[in-house]
Amino acid sequence: MAQTMNYTFLGRSGLRVSELTLGTMTFGRETSRDDSFRIMDAFADRGGTFLDTANVYSTGRSEEIVGEWLGQRNRREFVLATKVRFPMGDGPNDAGVSRKHILESVEDSLRRLGTDYIDLYQVHCWDPYTPLEETLSTLDRLVRDGKVRYLGASNYTGYQLERALTMQRANGWEPFVSHQPQYNLLERGAEFEVLPVCRDHGLGVIPWSPLRGGWLSGKYRREMDGAPDGTRIKQAEKEGWHESWSRYNTDRTWRIIEALLEIADRTGREPAQVAINWLTRRPGVTAPIVGARTLDHLNTNLGAVGWTLSDEDLATLNEVSEMAPIYPYDFITELQENR
């Protein structure tokens, strides 16, 4: 299959990555080792170089599978990202981003991944219990020691991200070069503060859940009573996950999905491809993370690049998915309009 992927810089860093990131959260869980290998083979054959995992995905098994596959490839050709934060055991220090947990976790990740270095090491979420100085100074040490090349964050608020970046700059520590937020047509809350902070500081943006757990895949219609058995949305309803049917069964959701389906039908694309293509066109976005339980899912998602939505279709999707501003954003906007 012909290479179709373009490459872009990760924020203001000199690191170039493919325009889509392969998410590996399902590896070792819903997706077997062999199927995971086939998915990574297909991603690489299309020019994909950016792989994203985390130590907690399948309790380390995802990292092991990615590492085994990388062992059969030229490691230098790929940008490997993983994360630290969430529990990897039952001990009192088996979670968070304390110096102890970070230093132990990075060694465990390096071992599972079978590599001497991690290209992008990301804090998976804010830790309210560990002093920020402790976390950031430890991350800086990892870069100086050569175990990590670049640093990133994920799931931070705008305030938390600004505070971390300011502290890194003030102390001469290695700064974050990227942020990984949830961002898609259904969830645009990152636009209020997180994305402006990223643009101001030149951070690359690597959105996760571009299809919101399958809601934007084209499977669901307004007239349905609920998610079919065997779908992630059905499981989310049972497990209490955020992408559950009861959370998103709203008029706004259906208006977004109906617009998505209409554009997909008219352009000859899959709804998932339209949703991801919209995301690639958003200001500041670097490389959306496309996950895949199967090779068919991956091939559909890879069809999101190599073409562009029209300005009219972009405007339609922007309008139908726009989130009503809350205070103080509504207040500030009103003042600006009436100055």
Image (cartoon, helix red, strand yellow):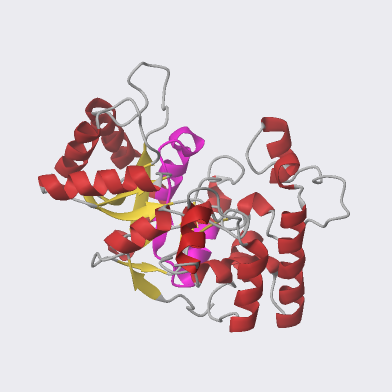
Tell which of 103 and 257 is nearer to you: 257
Q: Which quadrant of the rendered structure holds the N terminus?
A: bottom right
The x, y position of residue 85, in whole percent, is: 37, 34
Asked if 313 appears above or below 69 in the picture, the reply is below
Relative vertical location of residue 265 with respect to residue 198 in this rendering, above or below: below
Q: How many marks?
A: 0
Q: Quadrant of residue 10?
A: bottom left
Say whether residue 61 is magenta: yes
Expressed as whole percent of the image width and height from the top left, the position of residue 237 reads 72, 36
Chief SS of the magenta region? helix
**Residue 257 showing in the rendered view:** yes
Q: Is residue 95 magenta?
A: no
Is residue 46 shown above or below 59?
A: below
Report the quarter where the C terminus lies: bottom left
Task: Find residue 311 and report its horizontal and vertical position in percent.
Answer: 59, 82
Segment tinted magenta in the rendering: 39-66
Along the viewing direction, whichever of 37 and 109 lies nearer the viewer: 109
Q: Residue at x 24, y 49 (%)?
A: 165
- Residue 111, x across and y down, in percent: 30, 38
Q: Residue, x 13% and y 47% (percent of image)? A: 170
Can residue 310 be spotted in the picture?
no
